[in-house]
Image: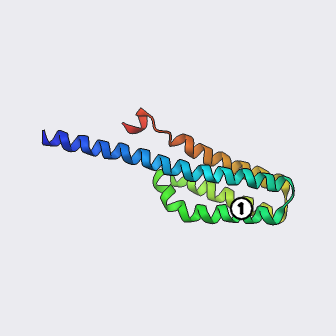
């Protein structure tokens, strides 16, 4: 009976942690997606200084949160997002509109993939 109670308690804690981490990741990544929308608009109107500032803010924030994110998302995906953000910043410094938009959309796609992968399903729990 004691083993069953301990197992059920551990399971409940695990499910709670899954939902909590999913909520925090969702909140953070949705803020990144909103920043990417603003960045895309800024790139489209050729506002390079603002675009570089926004991209730099996203990159620094993502670097600060990469430890937390790497607990939830695979390190490979975190590195891919970081590389894509660095490419976006590089293209913004060169004022290459098409490449910057492509790289920005690539970063958005990887963040959406990370959100999709982390959806809580019965398969993920068991």
The residue under the point 46% across, 38% down is 120
Which residue is tagged 1? 55
Expressed as whole percent of the image width and height from the top left, the position of residue 15 reads: 36, 42
84 sits to left or right of 25: right
Q: Which residue lies furthest to the left in this view?
A: 1
In this rendering, the answer to whether 81 lies above or below 115 is: below
Expressed as whole percent of the image width and height from the top left, the position of residue 52 reads: 76, 64
Image quarter hosting the N terminus: top left
SS at mark 1? helix
Q: Residue furthest top?
A: 122
| Residue 77, visible in the rendered structure | no
Expressed as whole percent of the image width and height from the top left, the position of residue 65 reads: 54, 61
The residue under the point 52% across, 50% down is 25
26 sits to left or right of 57: left
The quadrant where residue 57 appears: bottom right
The residue under the point 49% across, 61% down is 67
């Amino acid at each position: 009976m004691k083993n069953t109670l301990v197992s059920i308690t551990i399971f409940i804690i695990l499910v709670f942690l899954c939902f909590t981490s999913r909520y925090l990741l969702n909140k953070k990544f949705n803020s990144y997606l909103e920043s990417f929308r603003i960045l895309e608009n800024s790139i489209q109107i050729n506002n390079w200084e603002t675009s570089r500032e926004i991209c730099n803010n996203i990159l620094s924030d993502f670097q600060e949160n990469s430890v937390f994110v790497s607990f939830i998302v695979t390190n490979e995906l975190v590195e891919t997002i970081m590389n894509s953000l660095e490419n976006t910043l590089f293209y913004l410094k060169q004022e290459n509109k098409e490449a910057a938009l492509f790289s920005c959309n690539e970063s958005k796609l990887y963040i959406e993939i990370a959100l999709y992968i982390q959806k809580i399903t019965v398969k993920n729990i068991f």
